[in-house]
Amino acid sequence: MKILKIAVIAGDGVGPEVINEGINVLNKVAGIDSSFKFEFTYFPWGCEFYSKHGKMMDDDGIEQLKEFDAIYLGAVGFPGVPDHISLWDLLLKIRKSFDQYVNIRPVTLLKGAKTALNDVKREDINMLFIRENSEGEYSGAGDWLFKGQEHEVVLQNSVFSRKGTERIIRYAFETAKKEGRSLTSISKGNALNYSMVFWDQVFEEVSAEYPEVKTASYLVDAAAMLMIKDPKRFEVVVTSNLFGDILTDLGAAIAGGIGLAAGANINPERDYPSMFEPIHGSAPDIAGRGIANPLATIWSASQMLDFFGYEVYGKMVLDAIEQLLTEGQVLTPDMNGTASTSEVADRIIEIIESTVPSNTLNV
């Protein structure tokens, strides 16, 4: 039996609540197939850890995480800890240390989910965002000069290396080629006359190697408008760290809400563990009330199954989410329902059980 070692960082706010349900779903799926199982190890890192120890994770935290096949993250962020501390000292530290340079965020209107757009068919919203995840606008390069003085100056530098830019664009082309879909690049070359002109140049260079992939390029402001007015033109999308961050939140708004927004941080070479997470944040205002929506966390579990090569089970989980949404009976308050976090996950598990012959279940 294959043992998949998963590091669990439940984190802050609703993180522990939703991650617990994601783990329940993963364990249920593993019980279907006796060839593998999950082994979960919990780490108490996050803002509460910071309040006690003055740091978001152990000093040797990255070394500890290296031993795992994947990381399952709940959420980070809580009042009293500045957001740039919680982000840079845990989430971005992990992404950069493990060269998780591919961020995958599906923007798909699932069956049963509701969009804020009028006169749009479900199949019109089916995008896969591939976001550069290791450098760009989130490189952390810059300076703060003359702090607190009249002539105070801050410098925030974007870093676009040829290696970093080319590998994410090539990954996007390979994905589009494999799926038989078009690829759209989003940049801002008219205003960012170094970084984004360079991005556009590399996109053109790599595109010459993939003549079978239909391509398009848009400025980020135009792309934001077109995601609302004509979302069907976007299939696979590749963009920079910052633009990908912003546009996928917009995508969540048109694809059922932030409670359905899942994300994967991938190291394609598998030299390091990849990380899977919902992108809705820690929602401290509803923490402890048992009403947080676990569907994004469960969707990210589906992404984890895909990553490990269990695409059949990944699809099974996603199909279960769609059936739950279509039924419309067991939903959390953010989706106009009255169900609890655990009730939603329990229904997902019931659906999974109902789709598998009882004699194949091993739980």
Image (spheres, rainbow, N blue to C red):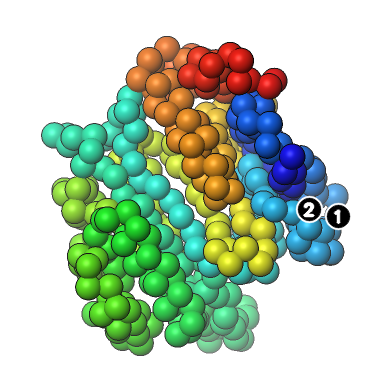
Q: Position of residue 107 (x, y in %)?
A: 36, 46
Q: Amino acid at mark 2?
A: Tyr
> Which residue is nearer to you in this view: 323 or 105?
323
* Label 2–label 1 contact, CB within 8 A: yes
Which three-letter amino acid code belongs to the residue tagged 1? His
Q: Residues within 10 Å of mark 1 (few under 14, many from 20)?
A: few
Determine whether the residue tagged by mark 2 lies in a helix, strand or loop: helix
For label 2, the crowd category at 10 Å Cα-Cα, with few meaning under 14, some 14 to 19 and many 20 or more, is some
Q: Is residue 61 left or right of residue 306?
A: right
Look at 74% across and 43% down and name the residue there.
Answer: 3
Residue holding disc 1: 53
Q: Is residue 53 visible?
A: yes
- The residue to which callout 2 is attached is 50
Residue 320's x, y, as percent?
46, 25
Q: Residue 4 location, x and y as percent?
A: 71, 45
Give the residue at x 78% y 53%: 50
Q: Please give left or right for residue 351 compared with residue 7 in the image.
A: left
Secondary element under disc 1, as helix, strand or loop, is: helix
Residue at point 38%, 56% (across, down): 129
Q: Which mark is residue 9?
A: none
The quarter in which the N terminus is drawn is top right
Along the horizontal axis of the image, is 356 left or right of 181?
right
Question: Outermost residue, left direction?
Answer: 119
In the rendered image, the vertical position of residue 329 relative to residue 103, given as above or below = above
In the rendered view, would you say 9 is above or below 194?
Answer: above
Q: Position of residue 276 (x, y in %)?
A: 58, 48
- Quadrant in the picture for the C terminus: top right
